[in-house]
Image: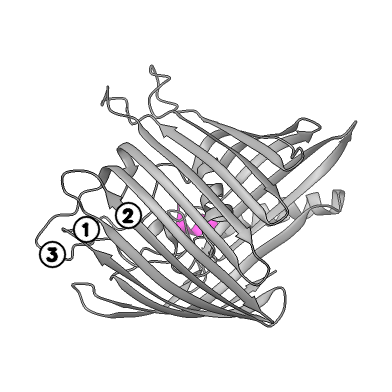
Amino acid sequence: MNKANKPILALAALTLCSGAAMAQTNVSFYGVMDLGVSVDRGGLAGPSTRVTSGMATQSRWGFKGSEALGDGMAAFFVIEGGIHADTGSSTQNNTLFGRNTAVGLRGRLGAVSLGLQDTPLFTTLNVVVDPLRNGIIRSNNLMSATGFRTGNSILYKSNEVDGYSGDLMYVAGEVAGDAAAQRAVGGSFGYSKGPLNARLAYHRRNNDTALLKHTEDARNLLLGANYDFGRAKGFFGYGVNRGLNSAPLNNSGAVFSSVVPVASTDSADLLLGVSVPFGASTVVASFVRKDDKSVRNQDAQQIGAAYMYAFSKRTDVYTSYALIRNRNGASYTEGNSEEPGTGNRQFAAGLRHRF
């Protein structure tokens, strides 16, 4: 796409959505602006200090809304794009709306939506398992899976019944002549009531292409839970990853030794975390372990702590420090919501405003 056309497309999108907002009052414009400074250490190229966008929560903008259709049914939509707020460009491979972008119907039996959407496994990792929702000290530095957000998807979410809920996703591979190639399926089931939130999620993706056949599927299983003890909230996650592309490296270009890092096809992940609020402040600590069960045994461990201070419900400041210990040639880097990072240690400090 010609770069000169992007402002025109953005203006057209804004005009279209503004017209919709005039027609129905429940269309809303929302977003997050998150900017700060990150300092990376431990990379072969040396230290790196950057002004970075979206470390705690990826900077974004979007529109969402719904329309009541009668008899308990409603139509809804969301279009959302990521922003490199430090440079003004778009994230997700420079796409205008590269985050959740979908349309659906909601009724008494649940909701069905189609488009570009988070997988049930990624939602479980974000909402249930990771105390920092994959921002600073993100869990998917080590707990990377084959399916986080995917296009061409159909998602069903049940309504909650006495704390129980479930969801199912189907992703069309769209490879001509081979309906199975690149196809994915997933889902989750969980319980959330009172202080307990627990969920089991699964995702399976076919690795075949138009030319490459009979590959091994990538499979990810994740069990997660958090429990609110009142003065503190505990977090737990355990994942099992099998097959090609089941645990891709978070930074495939990083090398810390003469041993070449290789993405594991047989691994297990463990996360333990705690969040302690007091007044306007919150302290979070987390531990993540990647257990590579392949012959290379390229294990890694991540430890980190973060502090956040809320000026209001919408504006806060944060700081964090995290460290990854790589073994046997593993080369996981310490990243955040916006980028994978360049070394195995990272300090971050920033300001986040939601609107």
Residue marked by disc 2? 290
Badge 1, how many Cα within 10 Å: few under 14, some, many 20+? many
> Residue 145 at x, y = what percent?
40, 46
Badge 2, how many Cα within 10 Å: few under 14, some, many 20+? many
> Residue 80 at x, y = what percent?
61, 53
Q: Earlier in the sequence, mark 1 or mark 2?
A: 2
> Residue 229 at x, y = what percent?
65, 65
From this viewpoint, which residue is outermost toward the front? 229
| The magenta segment | 1-6
Whether residue 253 is situated above or below residue 219 in the rendered picture: below
Q: Which mark is residue 257?
A: 3
Q: Are marks 1 and 2 in contact (CB under 8 Å)?
A: yes
- Which dot, 1 or 2, sits closer to the camera? 2
Residue marked by disc 1? 330
Q: Earlier in the sequence, mark 3 or mark 2?
A: 3
Queried whether the magenta region covers residue 5, the answer comes back as yes
> Residue 152 at x, y = what percent?
52, 34
State the residue in front, 76 or 328: 328
Mark 3 vs mark 2, CA separation in Å: 18 Å
Whether residue 217 is situated above or below residue 100 in the rendered picture: above
Q: Is residue 9 visible?
A: no
Mark 1 vs mark 2, CA separation in Å: 10 Å
Q: Which amino acid is tagged 3?
A: Ser
Q: Is residue 19 left or right of residue 12?
A: right
Q: Which amino acid is tagged 1?
A: Ala
Dominant SS of magenta comes to helix
* Circle 1: element type: loop
Whether residue 353 is situated above or below residue 245 in the rendered picture: below
